[in-house]
Amino acid sequence: MKIAIIIILAGLFIMSCTQTQSGRVVKIVSKNDPTISVRLFFPVGSQDDPAGKEGLASVTAAMLTDASTLKNNYDQILQELYPMAAGYGAQVDKEVTVITGRVHKDNWGKYYQLLKEAVLEPAFKEDDFTRIKNQTLNYLENTLRYS
């Protein structure tokens, strides 16, 4: 599976693109922005959900970005991200899933470790799944229905 990665770095606004084994890396450098933004594109979306398992791509993306990893539980991850004023999340569309994140350049090292663990070493714990499932159902039944 190919993954496109976009990283926005501090510096002069320059765009460069390199090809890696796993996909394409696009760097956009902006001199006046002290943050680093990351976008990971996965060519899989809701259209790939099996029949009877609609929402699988969305729940899977949430299990990567809003749940435990093999090294840290979800509360530990939140405690690490909070002082950095950083975070990451996911959006699933019909054809693509995008994991996004943003952090100040001074915190990149610690942040990168957390993001890498989230994407490459998810724990897929039952309590995380239950929490995400309940949040999703609550959104569908209460928020979406009345908006």
Image (cartoon, helix red, strand yellow):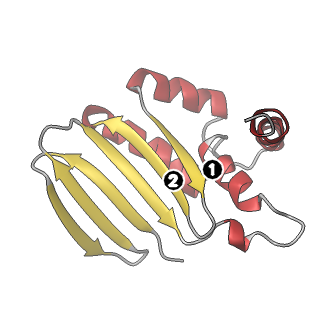
Quick one: SS at disc 1? Answer: helix
Q: Earlier in the sequence, mark 1 or mark 2?
A: 1
The amino acid at mark 1 is: Leu
Question: Is residue 36 placed above or below 73 in the rendered structure?
Answer: below
Residue 64 vs residue 146, the one in the foreground = 146
Question: In the rendered image, which quarter is residue 21 located in?
Answer: bottom left
* Position of residue 116 in the picture relative to residue 53 (left or right): left
**In this rendering, is residue 51 above or below 141?**
below
Q: Which residue is mark 1?
A: 64
- Classify mark 1: residues with Cα within 10 Å, few (<14), some (14-19) or many (20+): many
- Name above or below for residue 38 compared with residue 134: below
Looking at the rendered image, the quarter that the C terminus falls into is top right
- Check whether the beta carbons of the residues at disc 1 and disc 2 lie within 8 A of each other: yes
Q: Amino acid at mark 2?
A: Ile
Percent across and percent down for residue 128 are 76, 39
The disc placed on residue 99 is 2
The quadrant of the picture occupied by the N terminus is: bottom right
Q: Name which quarter of the figure residue 109 lies in.
A: top left
Query: Residue 134: x, y in percent?
Result: 83, 37
Q: CA distance from mark 1 to mark 2?
A: 9 Å
Comparing labels 1 and 2, the label whose residue is closer to the camera: 2
What residue is shown at x 42% (from left), y 21% (from top)? Answer: 83
Q: Residues within 10 Å of mark 2 (few under 14, many from 20)?
A: many
Q: Which residue is more in the foreground, 60 or 126?
A: 60
Q: Is residue 12 left or right of residue 38?
A: left
Secondary structure type for disc 2? strand
Residue at the front extreme of this rendering:
147
| Identity of the residue drawn at 64% across and 27% down | 75
Question: Percent position (x, y) of residue 9?
Answer: 23, 48
